[in-house]
Amino acid sequence: MKKLGIAIIGTGGISHFHLEGYLAEKDRCNVVALCDLYEDKCLTLANDYKLDLSLITITKNYKTLLSRNDIDVVSICLPPTLHCEVTSAFLLAGKDVLCEKPMAASLEEADVMLQAEKKSGKILGIISQNRFRESAWKVKKMLDQGVFGKVLMSRANSMWYRGNSYYDLWWRGTWNHEGGGCTLNHSVHQIDMLNWFMGMPTSTISIMTNLTHTNSEVEDTSLSILRYPQGVGEINVSLNDMNEKQDIFFQCEKAEVSVPWEIHCMKSKNNGFPIADLESEKKFQEIYDSLDGVDGKEGHPAEIRNFLNAVQGKDTLVVTSIDGKNALELIYAIYKSSSEKREVLIPLDKNDVFYKKETMFKVVPRFFEKTKSIENADGNITVGNMDEDK
């Protein structure tokens, strides 16, 4: 079988994880092009992984790659407000595309990308690498099988720490270029997973603010309460947490279970007070241990493997473009609820001001004025992984 030609668009910090994923699949793909406005970043990425520069095109203009017959798959590792334009262009040029989270900077842009995917007949995958973790994989199976009974309440904690200098980079901390703050760009991991586990909520009531990041227009904290047809949920997001603990809890009829994996069971004494149910905990632990986990490496490499399998017709895509839009649907409902200070129904209507970024950006709060802006920054980033070792 012919090897797939890979192009990576945007060679900042996150591109390293994409490149590592493709290099792990070198028996069926070759990286043939790197693109970035700063070509020195392309060179640094290539040199870091000892790529043969004689076999790779380096360019600052992605449009020069659209007609290349040797490019089959494209990874989009750009700021969110560029995802729609570049992803749609490559799809319509006949390339399969794997786009970094968040999928887009508005629901309207997400729909444009969905239309391009449908028109082209190609595959659009969205990065949500935390689905490809051992504990997430197994808990999803157990919830789907009803092992714990009905889910009564869920809670997602998206706790991160970023210093003020994080927002010095020119596109960060602005509604126009980043599309939002930590609710969009950090908690999208947990929000996608919560949707994966629970399905979409019917409404949210939310608040957001910026507590410490004074060089940023956007929020650094948000709290949301969700309604489901038969339960409630909660999403907590921060860029000020010095433990950076990211987890998801499910209060179920028979147990409390979490990702990373923990299991706790109680039973009622005659007076209604609880006592530990160690027998049930042991039973659930045995079920958990018996399940197959992620095949091979976790995170980006596992998702890239699944994406390539889908491209080659060997597997079903786990994180689809619809999943990417569903995460945005909840995020922009959170922004709407926070801005309008009321409960908001999901999904949003296409006539809603929060459907388009141009109308949304007119009504969202700007917490601080961005006064410092640098063109380039250290590419090193931290990728949350919700691992047991976190």
Image: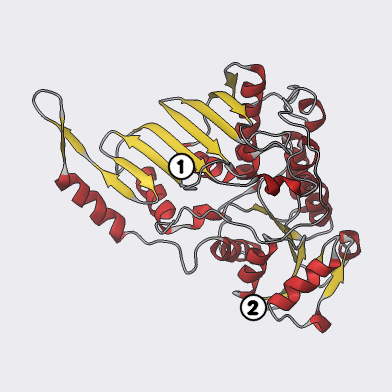
Residue 291 lies left or right of residue 94; in this view the side is: left
Q: In which image quadrant can residue 112 be found?
A: top right
Q: In which quarter of the image is the N terminus?
A: bottom right
What residue type is disc 2 on?
Answer: Lys
Q: Where is residue 59 in the image (x, y as percent from the top left)?
A: 88, 67
Q: Give neighbour class at mark 2: few <14, some 14-19, many 20+ (Cα, 10 Å).
A: few
Closest to the observer, 141 or 382: 382
Mark 1–mark 2 CB contact (< 8 Å): no
Q: Label 1 vs label 2: CA separation?
A: 32 Å
Residue at 47%, 38% (x, y): give it: 156
What x and y, as percent, mark residue 389?
41, 59
- Whether residue 111 sits left or right of residue 63 in the image: it is left
Q: Name the residue under label 2.
A: 26
Residue type pointed to by label 1: Phe
| Callout 1 secondary element | helix
Residue 349 appears in the picture as rendered: yes
Instruction: Give the position of the C terminus as an image quadrant.
Output: bottom left
Helix, strand or loop under label 2: loop
Q: Measured along the vertical axis of the image, is residue 357 above or below residue 196?
A: above
Residue at image mark 1: 197
